[in-house]
């Protein structure tokens, strides 16, 4: 009888959690620039879902506005929203809506970490920093009716023993690559435009290599992307990780700095471990610009040699450049494109310098009275949000667009790809995707209205 009574007891009500990633200019349902062909599965929501303590018996829904519309009438006991700076206004819009409906909202991610007081105006609680320890604690407090207004990353945070991301909760068919993973967090460098050292400090955090390998095996991944910000921040760890990947016989891509060519053994390990593509921040060809932005370690690298050494090992390169440093002039655009073409960089990318709030760059430009707008939706790497030193905002915008178009003309694609002959089918597909983007920039990033306003205010030609 006792057993029957126990069986008949209703199970405790489930905690219903909805986790939302808001849309951005490049990452939005239907009208975004990146169709499925260029998307990989982000890890933020799937990681947060995995961190929910099992004893809470929670039911979790992941809503990625980059792939589907958000249901504004959704039912949940708690809403969690993760925001970067470009999506912060949208995240506040969503948060305000759900709070008006009486649903408690938690905001986290890099922008709330950079601007916690601003985020707090739109949330019942803000998670500042990495959430591996604070998010589970917040949830336990919430269930106990004691959720605090703010949770900070612990100074002793460790990445050991974490559960694997819940990739099963997002529709894999909407992404070209579902197998994304992180082995490390953070970066040791002090680049003054980068949010990483400002938001999370310069202490690198690493997962035990055995756990990374176990997660790759668990995913049954043959091809994956490491989303780490700098896989070689700790050289010994990088050597251990790359060595451990060799027996897995996978192919992978990731991010490193140009300093990788100082270490021939590491280059060889990269190739042997299955690395087939790397994203590198060249940022600028100008020594003054590199010094200005505290990326002086790039100064010691011969960029041509970086490309040659990686290509010699069959590793393709996504090379990132930034326009708008104080030393940049109207000549900078053509010089950068010429380098990208002559070095045969497989997939060049150009961004407009963006002073993310809280970074040393933002603080300097603010002190100099050069910040033109604090509309965070424009802080996406493709709008001019500050007054450049030797260019007008319109010249910076037009020069960047011109660089994209020249780099992704059919002639330039052929010159780069058939010159390098690295991963040709994949490189060609990626280049055609970028070509589409290069020729439709204005569809996604249109700041004519803003430049017009500025021009009118300043009496300059826009
Ligand atoms: S090396 Fe890259 S990740 Fe590290 S601080 Fe510089 S820009 Fe940021």
Image (cartoon, grey):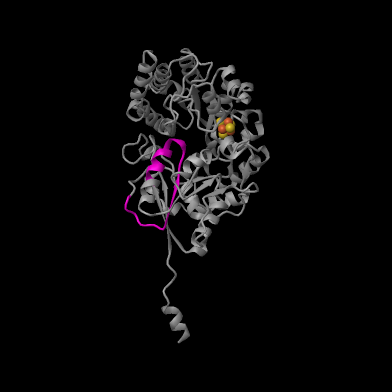
Q: Is residue 29 placed above or below 462 in the rendered structure?
A: below
Q: Is residue 83 placed above or below 383 in the rendered structure?
A: below
Residue 220 seen in this snapshot: no
Q: Quadrant of the C terminus?
A: top left
* Left or right, residue 73 beside residue 303: left
Q: Which residues are magenta?
A: 71-94
Q: Nearer the viewer, residue 313 or 37?
A: 37
Q: Nearer the viewer, residue 98 or 287?
A: 98
- x, y percentage for residue 454? 38, 20
- x, y percentage for residue 63? 39, 49
- x, y percentage for residue 233? 63, 36
Residue 238 seen in this snapshot: yes
Q: Quadrant of the N terminus?
A: bottom left
The image quadrant of residue 163 is: bottom right
- Residue depicted at x 53% and y 53%: 148
The image quadrant of residue 13 is: bottom left
- Residue depicted at x 35% and y 38%: 35
Q: Is residue 167 placed above or below 333 in the rendered structure?
A: below
Q: Nearer the viewer, residue 443 or 391?
A: 391
């Amino acid at each position: 009888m006792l057993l029957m009574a126990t069986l008949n007891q209703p199970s405790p009500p489930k905690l219903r959690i909805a986790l939302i990633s808001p849309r951005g200019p490049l990452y939005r349902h239907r009208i975004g620039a990146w169709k499925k062909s260029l998307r990989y599965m982000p890890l933020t929501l799937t990681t947060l879902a995995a961190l929910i303590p099992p004893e809470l018996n929670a039911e979790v829904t992941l809503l990625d506005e980059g792939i589907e519309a958000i249901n504004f009438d959704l039912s949940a006991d708690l809403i969690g929203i993760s925001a970067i700076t470009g999506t912060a206004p949208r995240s506040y819009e969503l948060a305000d809506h759900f709070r008006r409906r009486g649903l408690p909202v938690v905001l986290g991610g890099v922008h709330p970490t950079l601007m916690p007081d601003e985020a707090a105006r739109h949330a019942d609680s803000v998670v500042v920093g990495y959430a591996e320890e604070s998010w589970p604690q917040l949830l336990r407090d919430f269930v106990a009716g004691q959720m605090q207004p703010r949770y900070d990353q612990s100074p002793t945070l460790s990445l050991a023993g974490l559960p694997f991301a819940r990739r099963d909760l997002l529709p894999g068919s909407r992404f070209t690559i579902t197998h994304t993973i992180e082995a490390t967090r953070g970066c040791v460098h002090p680049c003054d435009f980068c949010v990483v050292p400002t938001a999370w400090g310069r202490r690198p955090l690493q997962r035990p290599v055995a756990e990374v390998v176990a997660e790759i095996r668990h995913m049954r991944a043959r091809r994956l992307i490491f989303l780490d910000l700098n896989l070689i921040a700790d050289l010994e760890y990088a050597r251990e990780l790359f060595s451990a990947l060799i027996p897995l016989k996978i192919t992978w891509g990731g991010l490193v700095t140009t300093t990788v060519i100082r270490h021939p053994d590491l280059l060889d390990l990269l190739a042997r471990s299955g690395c087939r593509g790397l994203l590198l921040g060249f940022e600028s060809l100008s020594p003054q610009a590199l010094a200005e932005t505290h990326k002086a370690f790039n100064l010691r690298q011969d960029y041509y040699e970086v490309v040659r050494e990686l290509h010699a090992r069959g590793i393709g390169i996504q090379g990132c450049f930034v326009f708008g440093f104080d030393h940049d002039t109207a000549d900078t655009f053509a010089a950068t494109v010429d380098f990208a073409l002559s070095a045969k960089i497989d997939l060049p990318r150009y961004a407009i310098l963006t002073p993310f709030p809280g970074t040393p760059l933002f603080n300097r430009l603010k002190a100099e009275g050069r910040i033109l707008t604090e509309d965070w939706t424009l802080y996406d790497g493709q709008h001019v949000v500050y007054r450049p030193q030797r260019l007008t905002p319109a010249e910076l915008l037009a020069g960047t667009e011109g660089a994209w178009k020249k780099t992704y003309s059919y002639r330039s694609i052929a010159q780069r790809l058939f010159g390098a002959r690295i991963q040709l089918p994949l490189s060609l597909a990626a280049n055609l995707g970028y070509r589409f983007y290069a020729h439709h920039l204005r569809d996604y990033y249109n700041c004519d209205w803003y430049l017009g306003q500025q021009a009118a205010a300043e009496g300059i030609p826009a």
